[in-house]
Amino acid sequence: MQLNPEHAAQVGSIKFTPARFGTGNGEKSIITSTGPYLIIWDFKKVKRGDTSAYTMRKHNADVIAENFVYNNDREAIITLPDDVTTIARDSMYRPEKLLTPQVRYCITNVYR
């Protein structure tokens, strides 16, 4: 499992925490984090070859640990340095909406 190259470039150094499966009614989701980013893959789509089927959420501090609520892959429990909280999966974002696009400059000089 990996992030798309453009998302990985914006996230920076990637050091995934151990991934865990959501095991409600079968293995539907995979959860992990890297730095302040919580990442959840849709495992059904990944098995069909869509490795970009993930959502992310950025926190103010590095995520220390994460897991799904028992028997429920719609909510995650995350541990931050000073807090333990639950996150609804509906509050996650597609990376395109979460990560800001890199600014690209195009300078064209036309001499006549």
Image: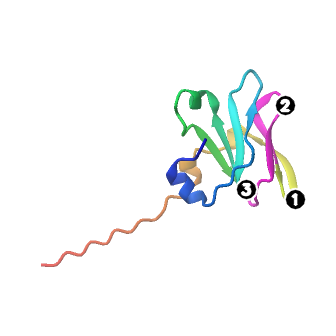
Q: CA distance from mark 1 to mark 2?
A: 22 Å
- Mark in front: 2 vs 3: 2
> Do the residues under discs 2 and 3 have CB atoms within 8 angstroms?
no
Task: Indicate the position of residue 108 as horizontal and vertical percent values.
Answer: 27, 72
Which circle marks residue 35 in the picture? none
Type of residue at label 1?
Answer: Asp
* Quarter the C terminus occupies: bottom left
> Does residue 1 appear left or right of residue 112 in this picture?
right
Say which quarter of the image contains residue 105: bottom left
Q: Which residues are magenta?
A: 59-78
Within 10 Å of disc 2 (Cα), the crowding (few <14, some 14-19, many 20+) is few
Task: Indicate the position of residue 95 as horizontal and vertical percent values.
Answer: 57, 48
Say which quarter of the image contains residue 47: top right
**112 part of magenta stretch:** no
Image position of 71 with respect to 86: above or below: above
Q: What residue is pinned by disc 2?
A: 70
Under circle 1, the secondary element is loop
Label located before the other in sequence (1 or 3) = 3
Tell me the chief SS of the magenta region: strand
Under circle 3, the secondary element is loop
Type of residue at label 2?
Answer: Tyr
Task: Indicate the position of residue 1 as horizontal and vertical percent values.
Answer: 61, 41
Image position of 86 with respect to 99: above or below: above
Label located before the other in sequence (2 or 3) = 3
- Name the residue furthest bottom: 112
Q: What residue is pinned by disc 1?
A: 82
> What residue appears at the point 53 percent right and 49 percent down from the top-left corner?
96
Q: CA distance from mark 2 to mark 3?
A: 22 Å
Type of residue at label 3?
Answer: His
